[in-house]
Amino acid sequence: MRRQLLAPSEPFRGCLRYGCAGLSSLAFLAGASAQIAPPPGPLDFSGQVQGLQAQPSGAQVQPSGAQVQPSGPVTTSVLAPPSMAPLPEQSLLQWGPVGFYPHFLYRFLYGDGVPAQPGEHFATAINEVYPGILLKLGQHWQLDYTPSLRYYSSSHFQDTTDHSVALNGGTTYENWTFGLSQRYATTSQPLIETGAQTDLETYDTAINAACQFNTKTSLEMGFNQGFQYVDQNASSGPLTDSKVWSTMDWLNYQFWPKFGAALGVGGGYADLSLGSSMSYEQLKGRITWQVSDKVSVSASGGLDDRQFVDSTQPDLLNPIFTVSAFYRPFEATTLSLDASRTVSPSYFEGLVTETTAVGGGLHQRFFKKLNLDFSTGYGVTSYELTSPGPNPLREDHFTYVNVRLSVPFLKRGTAGVFYQASKNTSTVSTYQISSTQVGFDLAYHF
């Protein structure tokens, strides 16, 4: 069969000219220093279904930094998440190309049913202080450092000082866009999976690149590496440190201005300190559809195939997906719906988690300043064996309801009150958790 050779468009020539060097450099950096799961910040029980807004088909890597793809154990705290004030347009101080944005958050919450150890739940008041500073380094880089000081009224919990450092940057060159994200975090939180206050230390790196071939076709590439170390201070048994390398690459095609699709392939390797390490491959499809000015839908789905090293367990084949839908009937009202199915290594030896979750939310603004945020959701996490181990199989069913009222003040501040109720029902009785929390917070960007 005779094949016709088409002359590449001018954008495609640019990709060919610089693609080989760019890809080789990215592959080397990914193998030398890249990332996994997002840093274990103060997430709430609904963290199982947060962050599911997929990137539009054909989207490029933004200069603000690379996207971090979760590949390791999901860090889900029992505590409700703090909410920071939005970044002001003008920095407090400008020194040449460096802008200084100090920020501060104080939060008080009272919770009952907070797990200190598996099967041991207590009521406690918690005072939290988050002082920090964001540096904008020219037009391409941002560096943020935020320590968090947490004080418990109950002696069953340890007061902690956590740290979070994040560097994000990006640039463009002809038809290429590049992004880099480097994060370090330490945290000590009561976690759903361990049923105890658990100390974590994470090092995360992500490198992304995208090339716009023409007005309809583009390529996205993502390389991730992440190291997570778990302190063995929980009485739930030995916990697993993880090192994960992964990649996910997409070929996008924009069929119409408001409808696009993509095909993605990826995979990774998880090196675990306990139990069987694992490799995996993923094949996904993705669509994004701006149905109207008020309705948008994004969905991706496919298969995750995992093989276990030095184990007699057969391969684990799972469907995976993420779905997000948004409806904005009025300028001050937004409704959202999220669903997902994910697979990741467990904190426990010889186990992998399969989590299916669905959630919905409402954002409503009243009187131009008062904001109401409501979210609720339900999910199931199943624990599957990767190799013979000491842990029994376990299945958790979790539900949550979050309500928050907030109002801005003095242009750069936000004050809010919140209520959260969450419940985790498990086939292993020591991981049954039922907790309610109320509190308030004050956040300010200087």
Image (tube, rainbow, N blue to C red):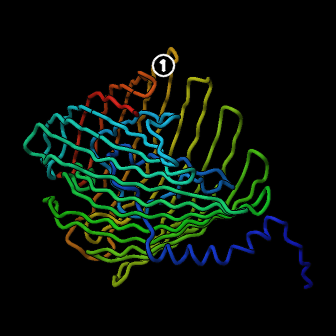
Residue at point 53%, 34% (across, down): 89
> In what quadrant of the picture does the C terminus appear?
top left
Residue at point 34%, 45% (across, down): 43
Where in the figure is residue 131, as x and y percent of width and height? 30, 40
> In what quadrant of the picture does the N terminus appear?
bottom right
Q: How many marks?
A: 1
Where in the figure is residue 436, as x and y percent of width and height? 25, 33
Q: Is residue 354 left or right of residue 441?
A: right
Extreme residue toward the left, this view: 155
Report which quarter residue 27 is drawn in.
bottom right
Q: Is residue 382 left or right of residue 60?
A: left
Where in the figure is residue 36, as x and y percent of width and height? 42, 64
Q: Is residue 351 left or right of residue 168?
A: left
| Circle 1 SS class | loop
Extreme residue toward the top, this view: 367
Where in the figure is residue 238, as x and y percent of width and height? 18, 67
Mark 1 sits on what residue?
369
Mark 1 burial class by Cα count in 10 Å: few <14, some 14-19, many 20+: few
Report which quarter residue 371 is drawn in.
top left
Q: Amino acid at mark 1?
A: Lys
Which is nearer the eye, 398 or 162?
162
Residue at point 23%, 39% (across, down): 434
Q: Is residue 175 left or right of residue 84?
A: right
